[in-house]
Image (cartoon, rainbow, N blue to C red):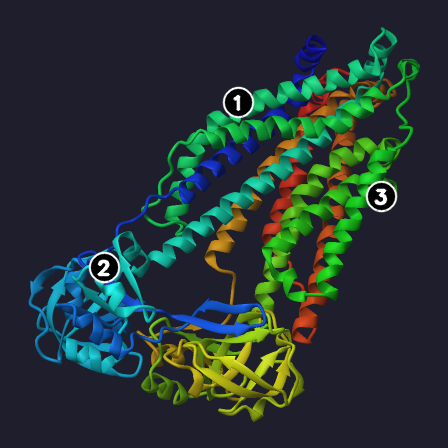
Amino acid sequence: MLTVALSTLRSRWTTFVTTVLTLTLGVALIAAAGVVIAGTVTAPDRPPRRYATAPVVVTPLDELRVRTANGVRVLPLAESRGLPSEVVTRVAELGPVVIDRVFPAGLAGGDSGMVGRPWAAARLGKYRLVAGREPRRTTEVVVPDGGAAVGATVTVSTADETRRYTVAGLTGPVRFERAVFFTDAEAARLSPRVDAVASRAAPASVRASVGDDALVSAGSRRRALDPDHRADTEALVAANAVVGTAAGVSGFVAVFVIASTFAYAVATRRRELALLRTSGATPGQVRRSVMAEGLLLGVIGSAAGCALGGPLARRAATWLVGNGLAPPWFTVAHPRWPFVVAFGAGVLTALLGVVAAAHRAGRIRPVEALRETAVEAAPLTPGRWLFGLATAAGAVFMLVEPVVAAPAEALGRKHYLPATMLLLVAIALLAPLVVPPLARLLGTVTGLLARQAALTASRRTAAMAVPVLLTAGLTGCVLTTTATIDAAKAAENGGLAVSSDLGLGPDAVARLRAVPGVQSVNVVRPTAIYAVDDDAAVVRHTARAVDRVPGVPVLAGDPSALDDGSIVVDAEFGWTVGERVQVWLADGSPRSFRVVAVVREGVGGNGAFVTGRHAGKAVVSWVEVDLAPGASRAEVARGVEVAVRGRGEVATTETSPPARTLGLQVILGLATVLAVLSIIGTTVMAARDRRGESELLGLAGATPLQVVRAKAAEALLVSGLGLVLAAAATALLGASLWVCLWRLTGQPLPVVVPWAPVGSVAAVCVGVTLVSALGASPARRRALGRRA
């Protein structure tokens, strides 16, 4: 059987070359993804930097402990409480200490995200002066080199005020933060909260002194106190998500391509396989022959893919770092296990792709070698019926379940990507059923020959249309979903808004209110609350401390009744109007509130609303600006930008995070490349097996140009079928999303289709199908001068 398989591959190499290329790319992506994931998991521990010279660092034990029916539950607090004064005193009794305070601060017109700290803490992070001296008076500061010159006067903004200081010195650059240093007394005035105490006492003595009242970090544990530690961790998780999803989608497309290629190959080789049966081959031998073909292709493609995996992993790591999806220090090693896994996955993918085709090949009877007809007996086998209906049922469940149970789930990538894949597989499996009516409809445009060819061989037509369906459907579904979600978020936000990492002080808010054309502003401080769910678990909920509840859809109650003793929540809480609830604020302070209104969850999740009194230490990072009737949006936006220059930026919409956008672009790009290879392979295979039809057209009197036109018309019909099916998949997913958004917001929001990229992919599909059909057709050569 191996000899037969080798002979088949040698004689039909054009049929399987795109399959090998697809498998090679798929295995290369899996291997590269494994290498990158291994690099993120085994990334070396970074040395501590903010407290590099401090042997022991004491920080607040920011935990919330709540007793429930299932015992004590412990959650990290959203906001630090700061170190209690008695803890600071006990640590100071052990020897000299350095008190550190970290708070938002920045230079007017400078970078956002800067922090203020006392000068005594500078030496803990190995800061060095490159010019000037340390600050000695409360009116002096030390700033990063490049921010200002020594002796210059700068405006420094903190959360509560903006003051002018004299630059006493400049510090050299450090990678982990950009800081403005004040005198210890000025830092204590600006931020009374103690965030850390550095000590040179023995760690055991410090732990014994503070007990369970604070967290003691020594050695490598000090790395967790660095400001970039969480950002690096989140970046590694983002890198994992991007490469993992890309590998998963590539594997899905590879299985899809191989399965469809072999299914069609077996369908076109029925007489050939029947001759094997006539010559004495048993059904098992025929099945093993087809499986051997898949195994050979799997080994060849997997080996080539593993060879490409290493260089691709290095390029992927460079791309992730360059686009901010991985820390700047991230590199990849060369472990062996990703290549072993990728090789095995490639071979397994090839075998899975041919198993159904091999089973069908074993059922071919010897008498079929005597048949000579172009009309297919049955477009769908029982197995394809069963699997197609099961997949369709799963797709329907994934589309309907969030509508009925949890609409917010439909907005997550973990839901709409699997739902898209399942829906496309279901449509592809059942495509031969809809080919005849669609071919009759589209055949009125492409002509009689193309229509009758599609009707005569619906399985072949479906096999050629499925790669187009996969490419255009995946692009249309994913891009339409993300564009619709972004548009819904923008519509929910309403008017202009100002965001600020540094925080907007009272002076900035006052300037906003004075901008011509501004009717009112709503100060928003992001925070969190904790509540007990069913007396069994403690759940952290997002919350916003506001001047007034924005115009969110109301289910019950009156949001305008919000005061210091009440709360407004969305429907996810499960609370009712008038109910008295026990919650904990972001810093762990217990509060008892009365629910005055219940609102819809909204696209981004509305969470809870409390008054500004319960904001804690949260800065004003978001201000909603309502325009007066008749005011020009553009003019107000310019005025708002001037009012908050150096403190924030004006936002008019809420779009997808850059990481998610880049990740989707990569995933769709890879899937498109793999699917285009499938289009080429299937079209070339179909052209090879239809040489006789081209010759018959010539014998019937058709000119070479007419033969070419017939081939072009059929290619257009096939690609049109794929695009119609892709549009149907996009419409089904969009309808489910529309209902989910309506349930979340209470208003009908439009489904947004990004026509430019979707149309570009559709045009690529049509062009590739057309060029492949004409380039592989014998009629192309005859069109140059010789008739059949």
Residue 148 visible within the image: no
Residue 623 at what x, y percent from top left? 44, 80
Residue 221 at what x, y percent from top left? 30, 55
Dot 2 lies on which element?
helix
The residue that label 3 is drawn on is 434
Question: 66 or 505: which is nearer to us?
Answer: 66
Looking at marks 3 and 1 on the same chain, the residue that comes earlier in the sequence is marked by 1
Question: 490 or 414: which is nearer to us?
Answer: 414
Label 1–label 2 contact, CB within 8 A: no
Residue 163 at what x, y percent from top left? 21, 82
Looking at marks 3 and 2 on the same chain, the residue that comes earlier in the sequence is marked by 2
| Alpha carbon separation for disc pair 3 and 1 | 39 Å
Question: 654 or 161: which is nearer to us?
Answer: 161
The residue that label 1 is drawn on is 303
Q: Residue furthest top?
A: 279
The residue that label 2 is drawn on is 203
Q: Kindly indicate the quadrant of the structure image that contains residue 294.
A: top right
